[in-house]
Image (cartoon, rainbow, N blue to C red):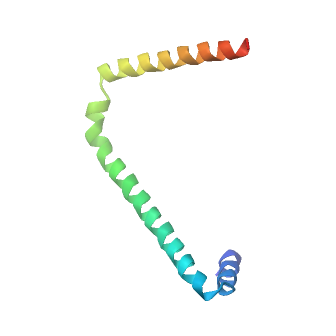
Amino acid sequence: MNAAEQTLIEKIKQLAPQRLAEVEDFVDFLRARDDEQRLTRAATKASEASFAAVWDNDEDAAYDRRSSMAATSRWRRVNASTQGA
């Protein structure tokens, strides 16, 4: 057991008994969140190949370039107007 784990255990031991349920609930929450994030990453990774044919095409590439240019143009206009203020 490392020092951080030992410190955490000592802190938990000092809690009032009614707080232990809260600590356990929080640990369960953290584990569930980690599990959910792992599942989401796995599902995303698994679906990349399926969506590649839909996302990676000339029509979408042209749209992406137009969208990028439009965003850059908007940023320049906003930036120019704030520089003069």
In the picture, measured across the screen, residue 32 lies left or right of residue 57, that is right
Residue lying furthest front: 18
Q: Tell me if I can see residue 2 in this picture.
A: no
Residue 20 in which image quadrant: bottom right
Residue 83 vertical placement versus 10 (above, below): above
For the point 36% across and 22% down, the residue is 61
For the point 48% across and 16% down, the residue is 70
Residue 14 in which image quadrant: bottom right
x and y percentages locating residue 76 in the rendered image: 60, 14
Q: Tell me if I can see residue 57 in this picture.
A: yes
The answer to which of 4 and 82 lies nearer the viewer is 82
Residue 55 in which image quadrant: top left
For the point 66% across and 78% down, the residue is 8
Residue 37 vertical placement versus 6 (above, below): above
Which quadrant, please, contains the N terminus? bottom right
x and y percentages locating residue 50 in the rendered image: 26, 41
x and y percentages locating residue 85 in the rendered image: 73, 14
In the picture, measured across the screen, residue 52 lies left or right of residue 4, that is left
In the picture, measured across the screen, residue 43 lies left or right of residue 20, that is left
x and y percentages locating residue 11 in the rendered image: 69, 81
Marks counted in the figure total 0
Residue 65 vertical placement versus 23 (above, below): above
